[in-house]
Amino acid sequence: MATTKEYRDFVLEQLSLLENITCRSMMGEYLLYSNGILFGGIYDGRLLVKIAETNKNFGMSEEIPYNGAKPMFMIEDVENKKLLKEIVFATCEGLKK
């Protein structure tokens, strides 16, 4: 089940506290970048971020974005803009290493 454009727009609005967030459509889903770093995506109406040492302390559950993919962390509280900012920042810091 592909993610709707309305949900994509909602997630992008929730990420508005972060600068330089870009979104790219990929086979009915959406890849998310922060300052050029691919940190996660929107898959089947779920906001997922890559697993990094720096974001493991947020207590997120592991989910599979699509068949054959590596697990990612699911952000359940998408409405909490401050928490989203912290998670994305921590994720990108871990992915830079």
Image (cartoon, grey):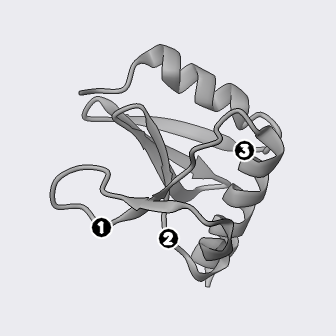
Tell me the distance, in whole angstroms, between the alpha carbons under discs 1 and 3: 25 Å
Tell me the distance, in whole angstroms, between the alpha carbons under discs 2 and 1: 9 Å
Mark carried by residue 20: 3
In the image, 50: left or right of 66? right
Quadrant housing residue 52: bottom right
72 over 51 or under it: above or below: above
Mark carried by residue 51: 2
- Which residue is under mark 1? 70
The three-letter amino acid code for the residue at tag 3 is Asn
Mark carried by residue 82: none
Q: Looking at the image, tell me whether mark 2 or mark 1 is earlier in sequence order.
A: 2
> Mark 1 near mark 3, Cβ–Cβ under 8 Å?
no
3 over 17 or under it: above or below: above
Quadrant housing residue 11: top right
Q: Looking at the image, tell me whether mark 2 or mark 3 is earlier in sequence order.
A: 3
36 over 46 or under it: above or below: below
Q: Looking at the image, tell me whether mark 1 or mark 3 is earlier in sequence order.
A: 3
> Mark 2 near mark 1, Cβ–Cβ under 8 Å?
yes
